[in-house]
Image: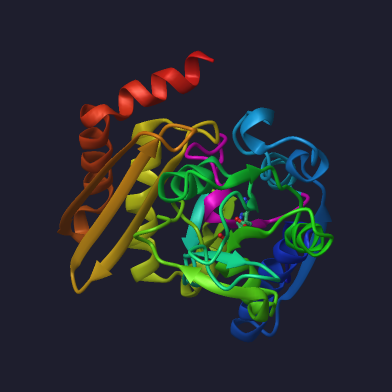
Amino acid sequence: MRKKIVIATRESQLALWQANNVKASLEALYPEISIELLGMTTKGDQILDSPLSKIGGKGLFVKELEKALLEGDADIAVHSMKDVPMEFPEGLGLSVICEREDPTDAFVSNAYHSIEELPQGSVVGTSSLRRSCQLQMHRPDLVIKNLRGNVNTRLRKLDDGEYDAIILATAGLVRLEMEDRIKARISDTFSLPAGGQGAMGIECRSNDAELIKLLAPLQHQETTYCVVAERAVNKRLNGGCQAPIACFALLEGDELFIRGLVGSTDGKRMVRGEVRGNKADAENLGIQLAEQLLTDGAQALLDEVYQH
Ligand SMILES: NCc1[nH]cc(CCC(=O)O)c1CC(=O)O
């Protein structure tokens, strides 16, 4: 029987919250096992002056953590599912997906209560192509300004007056007990979330059967159906951070309802789609939605993005 589980984690406040959340769950389940954190810095944490879409390369926030797993310095890595690439390195895999927090995007501002209230030409901070595309589709007058850094850095930049408002994931603010900064949770019909947003996942070595068994109780089945479908959409679209892509699944009884969109970076064009089907077909439904989007014009939009 193992005595210790080491969790590799980034050192942002949100990553530490998530790692500590998993640590607490494991400690409650297995009081005889000692759970330790191994903090590390990733490329995504270091390069803060350019938007993720320009840095390129998938898995900016996870590669260093995966190295620690492969070299045996750590046993598990806790990730925001939104940041986890579709493919895992040989020998590693996702063992569980945990219960999802509110998946919406949050409107954060010191002066305004909603996007609708923003005066013409207001400056909104986000580096997410998905968020800016949908924002500009509804409000072409808004000026989008890049905003990177961890949650606290982003909030400080807002408070410093660089932006009239910023958009962040609701989940991050809720987890860090900064819900009071949220002026409005943006409806999914206005801003469709990113695949995996609000859900945490745990990665470990695929051959560590004992550990995989220990982690199983942390799995949240409803969230897993949804996130599996969303990841299938992303995988089939083969989109990295360079294209505005959103997809979001809801479980209604046994029926999975998945919506997706691919846009142009300026928000002037957008292809939307949705599919419904049995949750047991989650992955296939995701693929089906992606293919529908591609046929309806997403392929052309993605080709444009990746030519530049
Ligand atoms: N891209 C960074 C990132 N990855 C996960 C979250 C938020 C928490 C989550 O979605 O689980 C964030 C910050 C944000 O989008 O505001």
Answer yes or no: is residue 1 visible.
no
Q: Is residue 133 magenta?
A: no
- Against 239, is 115 above or below? below
Tell me what residue is drawn at x 42 percent, y 71 percent: 220
Give percent across and percent down for residue 8: 74, 56
Answer yes or no: is residue 81 visible.
yes
Res 18 → quadrant: bottom right
The foreground one among 255 and 53 is: 53
Q: Is residue 74 magenta?
A: yes
The foreground one among 155 and 171 is: 155
Res 60 → quadrant: top right
Q: How is the image coloured?
A: rainbow
Left or right of residue 278: residue 19: right
- Give the extent of the magenta segment: 73-92
Ligand 1, what quadrant? bottom right
Tell me what residue is drawn at x 34 percent, y 60 percent: 189
Numbered-mark total = 0
Left or right of residue 161: residue 274: left
Position of the N terminus by quadrant: bottom right
Tell me what residue is drawn at x 82 percent, y 41 percent: 46
Give percent across and percent down for residue 291: 23, 33
Tell me what residue is drawn at x 36 percent, y 56 percent: 248
Q: Quick one: which residue is furthest to the left in this view?
A: 277
